[in-house]
């Protein structure tokens, strides 16, 4: 098993030196755990070149380009401008009067792990058997047949981060998926996307475990729980660092015994796994920031950050994204201090502002949620353009996922994840008409042959038809 | 009470009689039934004094160009007034653990006019709502109230209907089988009929044992007589049909709540003249009772002639004003725009006999919202809200929080 992680050259070395393919011992070359044992099998489908003519572009980079063309070749955006030439063999879309945006990105989704129907047989999003379950990976719970995915696609969502729930202090690894139909989760996995780790502040973990009379039952218990885990992870990381250093120095050493839980935490300390931290309240965000410095890791984003407007200077200073709803509030105390201007105010403070859904209904209309957040900011006098606002659902989420080199904006060289809207995307009347992922048409409102439907839907309402 | 306080009380009670006069010029007026493009609206003493060109001198003139006016929003499925923070049980009064209090649970008894949800929602254009109890020990949930979110929030009617739950949740409270739940329901209704016919003996404990408490039977008496509507939560097409048949057998006056698969039996609902309280936003098969969920359910029901009444965005109570967003989505999926506006204004106001007409019409008490643009667009803010004749201050806890933390950069 360990051999999967080795390069071919290392494999040869190992076999020559050790003379045995299952030996624990190596000289000069440490045997490291495979960091990608469930690799993506997603392939960019072959598709002809594409020219989208005359749309109004919201680029995701705070720019609006009216009546502009965009060219896609080999799955990438290759040209943006006026009156572009038709590439050879290109499909040409007349988009005059329509709007083009990057594919929307939802960094907080439980599709697949809490699928529809919401029945216990496949509600697999929260491993609430221990407060620290860094060893679980959301992808192992994802049901690719969840019919929620295609509804999000019809709403223009091309990339989703699927996270474990928030019942635990450290809930497990998240996974970033391309919103394409597949019979395996590997077929949806965004190739080479960084892994994330879900952590949760506040009421949920202390309620779940407090009700069982075990740690944590308080917020101080929460903090103790995280810190104990990071202390263990620090020691574990040292054991591996010592092993690697020793082997590279020529010592004959056994690798440390693998521990899945600590392996993920070590990935965070190594800067390879990104922290996405459910955290509503400003005081807790500040404590999480201090803790990240205590143990030497970076927080990518605070999710459900209802009090992000209070924390905006901290978010800007620490370069942490605030991931927010437009207006959800009041379902628990830590969500009581909602202001509709939250996203606008985080943005105003020059921090990274992101809109998210956490919900299979809201994910279908992130454009409307963005409209609400923009409108609230404008109401208080902030100058927020559509071009600015759409970044909350495109480029900023890509930044939080570590994927802003590939997705999140209409720029030359980026993946052609595109949404063509029938009208201003911030209008309630607007629909995603066509959705491309890597230049391949994945949804077309005008063509039922390009409207994916999961197996679950077949004949379930009516023997002759698919569920609408 | 001294003289001064009496005077204050009088002023408060009749506040809109002395209210400022307002002329809104050139706004698109959605009356609840039609639309009058770029029209003037005159409000005097809290009433609509003119629609159309007006040259009357007023305290205030508002340029309504590019803006719109609609009747005040009415959300027919909320818990307003009986919840503050959902996860904090002592603030939640819309259901009970007490099995002897089902139909007799009157949420109006718990109404909290000081709830922060009320100013928040009224600043966003919500003027009226139903406050609906939820079933927790049996099929019957309790009595539905009609509330107004004005400057002095109040209960207008403490019992406009009795709510009953025949969803999978309700069925789980009645033996975990639809068939068992039907048996329980028939027994409950038969007991109510017996109770009503033998009330004195029943109260004296001289009748047989009943399946519900005496208080619950008393609350159901006007339901079995057909005088008071029974709001039935249900989703599956076959359950809707079963309820229609039951209502026919017992002479009940039904209103459906939910009806996710209503489109599959739309003609039957229309023929029975049963209105439907629904959220047009649902399109996911969240349970096996809602496999047929689809975004054009509202359109298909309306096409069949069903009377629609809206709630919004997952029947959200804290954001009850978002009934407008769900209505917008219904329009985006085929429903006529005026029908969508009616379903959250004039239709519920008339169906539940509100204190306002739910319409913008000459002589009516002003209960309306001026929006920054199209009334269904999320980019249109409520700029002026008048509830039952009174202008509502744009003040809420949320706005205070915003202003405390906002630091404009110089």
Image (cartoon, coloured by chain):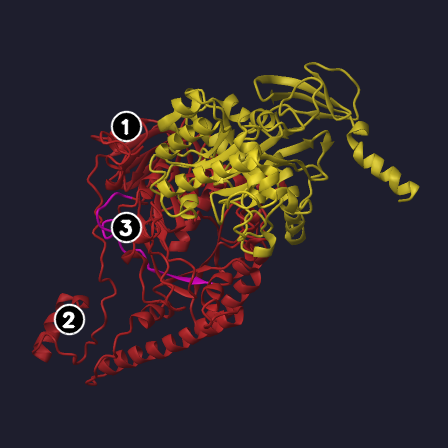
Chain colours: A red, B yellow
Q: Which mark is residue A143?
A: 3
| Mark 3 surroundings within 10 Å by alpha-carbon count, few (fewer than 14), some (14 through 19), many (20 or more) | many
Viewer-proximal residue among A388 and A73: A388
Q: Earlier in the sequence, mark 3 or mark 2?
A: 2
Residue B171 appears at what percent x and percent y?
A: 40, 44
Is residue A427 visible in the rendered structure shown here? no
Q: Which mark is residue A10?
A: 2
Viewer-proximal residue among B169 and B389: B169
Q: Which chain letter matches label 3?
A: A
Q: Which mark is residue A447?
A: 1
Viewer-proximal residue among B118 and A374: B118
Residue at 63% over, 44% down:
B81
Q: Are marks 3 and 2 in contact (CB under 8 Å)?
A: no
Task: Tell me the quarter of the picture where residue A375 sits.
Answer: top right
Residue B262 appears at what percent x and percent y?
A: 40, 30
Give the magenta part as a residue range. Answer: A180-200
**Total marks in image:** 3
Task: Tell me the quarter of the picture where residue B345 sits.
Answer: top right
Q: Which mark is residue A31?
A: none
Q: Which chain letter matches label 2?
A: A
| Mark 1 surroundings within 10 Å by alpha-carbon count, few (fewer than 14), some (14 through 19), many (20 or more) | few
| Quadrant housing the N terminus of chain A | bottom left
């Amino acid at each position: 098993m360990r051999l999967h992680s080795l390069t071919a050259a290392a494999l040869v070395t190992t076999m020559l030196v050790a003379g045995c393919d299952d030996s624990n011992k190596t000289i000069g070359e440490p045997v490291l755990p495979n960091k990608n044992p469930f690799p993506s099998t997603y392939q960019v489908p072959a598709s002809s070149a594409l020219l989208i003519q005359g749309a109004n572009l919201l680029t995701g980079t705070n720019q609006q380009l009216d009546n502009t063309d965009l060219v896609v070749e080999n799955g990438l955006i290759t040209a943006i401008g006026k009156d572009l030439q038709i590439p050879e063999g290109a499909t040409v879309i007349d988009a005059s009067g329509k709007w083009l945006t990057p594919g929307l990105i939802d960094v907080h989704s439980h599709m697949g792990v809490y699928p529809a129907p919401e029945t216990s047989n496949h509600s697999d999003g929260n491993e609430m058997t221990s407060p620290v379950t860094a060893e679980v990976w959301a992808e192992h719970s994802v049901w690719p047949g969840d019919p929620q995915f295609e509804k999000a696609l019809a709403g223009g969502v091309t990339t989703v981060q699927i996270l474990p729930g928030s019942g635990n202090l450290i809930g497990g690894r998240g996974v970033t998926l391309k919103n394409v139909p597949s019979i395996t989760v590997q077929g949806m996995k965004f190739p080479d996307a960084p892994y994330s780790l879900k952590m949760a502040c506040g009421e949920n973990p202390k309620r779940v475990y407090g009700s069982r009379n075990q740690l944590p039952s308080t917020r101080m218990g929460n903090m103790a729980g995280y810190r104990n885990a990071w202390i263990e992870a620090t020691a574990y990381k040292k054991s591996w660092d010592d092993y690697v250093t020793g082997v590279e120095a020529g010592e004959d050493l056994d690798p440390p015994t693998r521990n899945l839980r600590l392996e993920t935490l070590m990935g965070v300390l190594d800067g390879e796994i990104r922290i996405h931290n459910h955290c509503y309240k400003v005081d807790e965000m500040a404590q999480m920031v201090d803790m990240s410095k205590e143990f030497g890791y970076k927080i990518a984003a605070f999710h459900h950050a209802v009090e992000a407007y209070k924390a905006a200077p901290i978010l800007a200073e620490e370069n942490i994204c605030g991931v927010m709803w437009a207006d959800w509030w009041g379902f628990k105390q830590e969500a009581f201090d909602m202001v509709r201007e939250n996203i606008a105010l985080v943005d105003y403070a020059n921090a990274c502002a992101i809109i998210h859904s956490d919900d299979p209904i809201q994910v279908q209309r992130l454009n409307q949620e963005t409209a609400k957040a923009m409108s609230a900011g404008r109401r208080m006098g902030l100058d927020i353009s559509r071009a600015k606002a759409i970044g909350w659902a495109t480029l900023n989420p890509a930044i939080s996922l570590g994927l802003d080199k590939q997705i999140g904006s209409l720029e030359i060289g980026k993946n052609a994840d595109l949404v063509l809207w029938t009208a201003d995307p911030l209008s309630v009347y607007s629909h995603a008409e066509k959705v491309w992922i890597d230049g391949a048409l994945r949804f077309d409102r005008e063509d039922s042959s390009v409207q994916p439907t999961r197996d679950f839907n077949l004949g379930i309402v009516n023997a002759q038809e698919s569920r609408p | 009470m001294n003289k001064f306080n009496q005077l204050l009380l009088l002023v408060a009670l009749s506040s809109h009689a002395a209210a400022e006069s307002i002329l809104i010029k050139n706004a698109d007026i959605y009356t609840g039934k039609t639309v009058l493009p770029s029209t003037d609206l005159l409000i005097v003493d809290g009433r609509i004094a003119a629609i159309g060109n007006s040259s009357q001198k007023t305290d205030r003139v508002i340029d309504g160009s590019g803006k719109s006016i609609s009747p005040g929003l009415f959300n027919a499925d909320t818990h307003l007034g009986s919840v503050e923070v959902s996860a904090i049980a002592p603030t939640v009064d819309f259901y009970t653990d007490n099995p002897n209090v089902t139909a007799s649970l009157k949420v109006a008894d718990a109404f909290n006019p000081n709830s922060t949800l009320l100013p928040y929602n009224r600043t966003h254009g919500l003027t009226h709502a139903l406050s609906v109890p939820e079933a927790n020990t049996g099929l019957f949930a309790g009595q539905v109230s009609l509330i107004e979110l004005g400057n002095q929030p109040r209960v207008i009617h403490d019992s406009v209907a009795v709510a009953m739950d025949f969803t999978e949740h309700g069925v789980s409270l009645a033996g975990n089988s639809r068939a068992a739940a039907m048996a329980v329901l028939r027994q409950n209704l038969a007991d109510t009929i017996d109770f009503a016919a033998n009330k004195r003996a029943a109260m004296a404990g001289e009748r047989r044992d009943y399946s519900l408490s005496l208080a619950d039977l008393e609350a159901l008496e006007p339901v079995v007589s057909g005088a008071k509507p029974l709001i039935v939560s249900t989703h599956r097409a076959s359950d809707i049909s079963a309820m229609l048949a039951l209502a026919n057998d017992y002479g009940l006056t039904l209103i459906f709540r939910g009806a996710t698969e209503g489109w599959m039996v739309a003609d039957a609902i229309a023929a029975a003249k049963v209105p439907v309280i629904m959220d047009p936003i649902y399109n996911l098969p969240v349970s096996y009772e809602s496999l047929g969920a689809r975004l054009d359910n509202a359109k298909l029901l309306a096409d069949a002639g069903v009377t629609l009444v809206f709630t919004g965005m997952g029947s959200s109570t804290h954001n009850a004003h978002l009934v407008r967003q769900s209505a917008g989505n219904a329009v985006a999926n085929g429903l006529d725009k005026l029908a969508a506006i009616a379903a959250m204004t004039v239709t519920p106001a008339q169906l539940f006999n509100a204190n306002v007409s739910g319409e913008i019409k000459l002589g009516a008490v002003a209960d309306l919202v001026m929006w920054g643009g199209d009334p269904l667009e999320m980019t249109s803010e409520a700029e002026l809200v008048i509830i039952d004749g009174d202008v509502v201050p744009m003040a809420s806890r949320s706005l205070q929080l915003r202003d405390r933390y906002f630091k404009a950069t110089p």
